[in-house]
Amino acid sequence: MALIKGGRMSLDPFHSVGAEGELPADGDVLVTLARWQAQREELLGRPGRLGVKLASDQPPALIASDLGHFALVALEFPAFRDGRAYSYARLLREQFGYTGEIRAVGDVLLEQLHFMVRAGFDAFELDSADPEADFATAVGEFSVWYQPATDDRPSALELRHRHDR
Amino acid sequence: MYRYDQFDRQLVTERVAQFRRQVERRLNGELTEDQFKPLRLMNGLYMQLHAYMLRVNVPYGTLSSRQLRTFAHVARAYDRGFGHFTTRQNIQYNWVKLEDTPDILAELAEVEVTAIQSSGNCVRNITSDQYAGRAKDELVDPRIYCELLRQYSFLHPEFSYLPRKFKIAVTGSPHDRAAVALHDIGLRMHLDDQGRPGFEVLVGGGQGRTPFIAHTIREWLEPEHLLSYVESILRVYNIHGRRDNIHKARIKIIVNQMGIDKYRELVDADWERIRDSRLRVPQEEIDRIAAYFAPPEYAELSDASEELAARQGADPEFDRWLASNVVEHKVPGYSIVNLSLKAPGRAPGDLDADRMDAVADLADRYSFGQIRITHRQNLVLVDVEQRKLEALWRALKALGLATPNIGQLTDIVCCPGLDFCSLANARSIPVAEDLGLHFVDVDRLALVGDLTLNISGCMNACGHHHVGNIGILGVDKRGQEYFQLTLGGCSDESASLGDRLGPALPQSEVPGAIEAIVETYLGLREDGERFLDTYRRVGLEPFKQAVYEGADSKAVA
Amino acid sequence: MVDTENPMQMIVASRLTDGRVVFMAPGNSWAESIDEGVVADDSDAAADLLAEAKRAAERSVVVEPYLIEVTVTAGRLRPVLLREAIRAFGPTVHDSEAVVRS
C-alpha cells in the first residue's frame, strides 16, 4: 500500500490505532470514530496531530463540530462499489469547510481517482506497482467535465458561457 | 436535435480512450472480472447468456438518420445483423465481442452516440415522450431539460457509485407518455400563470420486484434550480439508500421506508445550502440547448384531415392504419407516424440492418431526417406531411412496418427473456410471438381498441408488465415456465400497477386466457370505454372467472 | 435416465474475448460445441474439472465457469436445465429477420 499525496508517494506520519491498540506517547495518530468518542479528552491531551477514520455508514455530520481538531479525515471504501464517501468528502469540504487532509482508504480503484479528486479527496491509499505513474494517468484521463464539483476548475457549462459574462 | 460542441466531443473521446485501456487491461489479465465488471457496466456492456450485450443510449429516444444508419452498420459489422429497441428508448446488440467494443464505441462516438451509463449504479438514459416537440398537447419540449440533465449526470464524480441504478424521465405534456410516475425521479412540466415553465418533481417510482408509484416531493421547481435540486435528491439517496440488499437498494425503497415527508426534509436541508451555487442554470444554457430543438422548416400547409376523411372507405387498409398508427401533430398539415415493429411471429422491438437503413431513408424523405424510439419498442417519424401519408404507408407496408396495431393488443412490449438474458426465469419472446399469431384479425383488434400488453421474463420487469393493461410475468415453477397475469396497469398520468389475476398458467394456456379476457371486456364495456376503463369500473372478478372458471378458458384457437 | 447420485456434469463458461458459450474440452481447451466437451461421470471428476476451470478464469481465458448437469438424448449430449440448453444450442426463437444463428 502506498500513500499518494499531492500526486507523490509520501510517508504516512499517522499511526493507525485499532480499537484496542495502545496510543503511542507522541506522534500523529489516526483513530476510528468510536475510539474518538470514547477517548476524546485523552486524544486531545496528547502531543501530535489527530486523524479520524469514518466508516462508510458514518457521515461527516457526526464529527462536524470537532473538525477543527483533525488534521486528517480518512474515509473508508469497504468495497469500491460503496460510493457514500464521495458525498462525505464533498460535504466535508463544501458544507463544513474542512481544509485538512481527506484520505481515501480501503478498496480504491485507479478508475475512481479522477472522481475522488473532484469530490475533494487529496490523499489516497493505493495498491499499485507504480503508484505515482498510475495516479498521474488516472487523474489525467479527463480534461473536460460537465458538472461543478468541489474543485474550482470550471465545468463545460461554465466554459461555454464565460464569454457571455 | 442536440449537436456536440467541442466539450461534448472531448469528453466522449476521452471516455472511449479510457474504456479502450480498460478493455486492454482486462484482456491481458491486469484487471480481474470483479474489478472490470462495474467499469464495463458503466459503458453499457453486459455479459448475457450467449455473448456480451451492448446497450447503446439514445437520449430521450431521438435519433438522426445518420445515427440510425450507423446502428445498421454496427449490426452488420459487429453483431448478427439486427438490434433490439428497448423500453427505455435505447438500442441493444445481443452478440458483440469484448475485443470489438472499443471500436464500436469509437464508431458510435463519431456520430455523437454513446453507451456511457446505459448500465451500472449511476444515472441512466434520461427518457421522455416519443412525441416531444410535436404533440398537440405539449407545453414545452421536455428534451431541452433531458439534455441538460444528461450532461449534468454524465460521469458525475459524486454519483457514479450509487446504491443502485437511477432512472429519470421528463414529460412536457399533461398526458404522460414518458411514464414519469414509474421512475426514480419523474419530472412533470407545468406552466405558471405567466406561462413560464416549471417542474413538478416526483421521486420513488419504479417497477421491478417491488413496484411503486412515485410521490410528489415538490410541486413547483423553476428550471434554473433543476440541477441543484436533483443533486440534493441524489445526495440523500447516495448517503441513505440501502446497500445491504441488491433488491432493496433503489430510491423507491428508502422513500417508502422513511416516508416522502422525511425524504423531502433531508433533500430540502441540503438544497437550501446549494440552490444558489454554481449549479444554478443560467438562462443562456437553457437557451443554447433549446436552440437545438427548434422546430424544422415546416411548409405552410393547411390541415388535410378533411381530405383524408373525405376519401375514407376508398382503401380500408389505409384507413385502418391511419386510425391506429397516425397521431395528430401540433402543426397544421403534418402528422406523427408510428412505425410498428410488431408483426405476427416477430420478436418485439427487433429490427434488422436492412430495415434500419430503409427507415433512415424514409426519415430523410418524409420527416426531416429524424426518428424517435418509443417505450413500446416502436419507431416514430414525427414530421410527416399529411398529403404524403399514403405514399409513406405504401413504403412502410412493403417493409412490414405498417401493422395497424399501435397501442393495441398485438403491440406487445416484451423483454428479451430467457432466450437471451441471464436474469430471466422464462422465455418471453415465444409468448409474444404466439399471441401475435393468435390475434391476427386486425378488424377485431380495432374493435378491441386501446389495450396495452406487456411481457417480462422475470421479476426485474424490463418488459414493464406492472403497467400493462394486461401484464404477463414469466416465473419458474418447479423448473417449468409459467406465466402470471396481471390486469389494470397503466403508466400515464393516472398511473396504476396491475392486479394479480390468479395462479400462473403454463405457456399453452396463455393465448386462451387472453382471449377470455378480451371477450369478457367486449361483453361488459359501455360507451367508448377502453379496456382499462372497463377494468377500473368492474374490477378483477369477471375476468378472473372467465380465465379460471370459464368453459372455454383453456381454448386455444 | 439421469443418475441422480452421480449425474453427468460438464463445465460451461463464457469466453472472455467474445462472451461466447464454451464447454471445457479435453486438454484444458474450450469448445463452442457441447459435443466436444468433457463429461465428468462422478462428483470427484466434476470437482477436478471445476478447479481447472477456475484456474482458467483466473488466467482470464473464461468468465464464470460452473458445472451443469447433462444427459444423453437420442445419442446427443443435452443440458438438463432449459436455461443451459438455451446457452448450449442458442435462442429458441427464430427471428425471421435475423441473420442465421450458429
Image (tube, coloured by chain):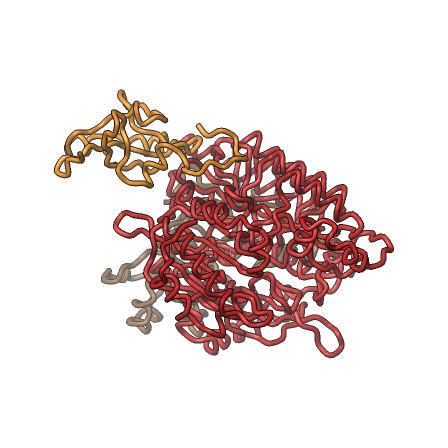
Chain colours: A brown, B red, C orange
Q: Quadrant of the C terminus of chain C?
A: top left
Q: Residue at x 47, y 53 (%)?
A: B463
In the rendering, at what x and y percent does residue B468 appear?
49, 60
Q: Quadrant of the N terminus of chain C?
A: top left
- Work out whether B128 lies above or below B75: below
Q: How many marks?
A: 0
Of A3 and B430, which appears nearest the observer?
Answer: B430
Question: Which residue is situated farthest in the right direction here?
Answer: B300
Q: Is residue B359 left or right of residue B445?
A: right
Q: Is residue B318 left or right of residue B39?
A: right
In the rendering, at what x and y percent does residue B343 appear?
55, 44
Q: Is residue B297 left or right of residue B417?
A: right
Is there any visible trace of residue A36 in the rendered image? Answer: yes
Is there any visible trace of residue A100 in the rendered image? Answer: no
In the rendering, at what x and y percent does residue A111 appear?
48, 45
Of B93 and B413, which appears nearest the observer?
Answer: B413
Q: Is residue B172 left or right of residue B523?
A: right
Determine which quarter of the picture holds residue B257: bottom left
Of B191 and B121, which appears nearest the observer?
Answer: B191
Q: Residue at x 15, y 32 (%)?
A: C42
Question: Which residue is situated farthest in the left direction here?
Answer: C5
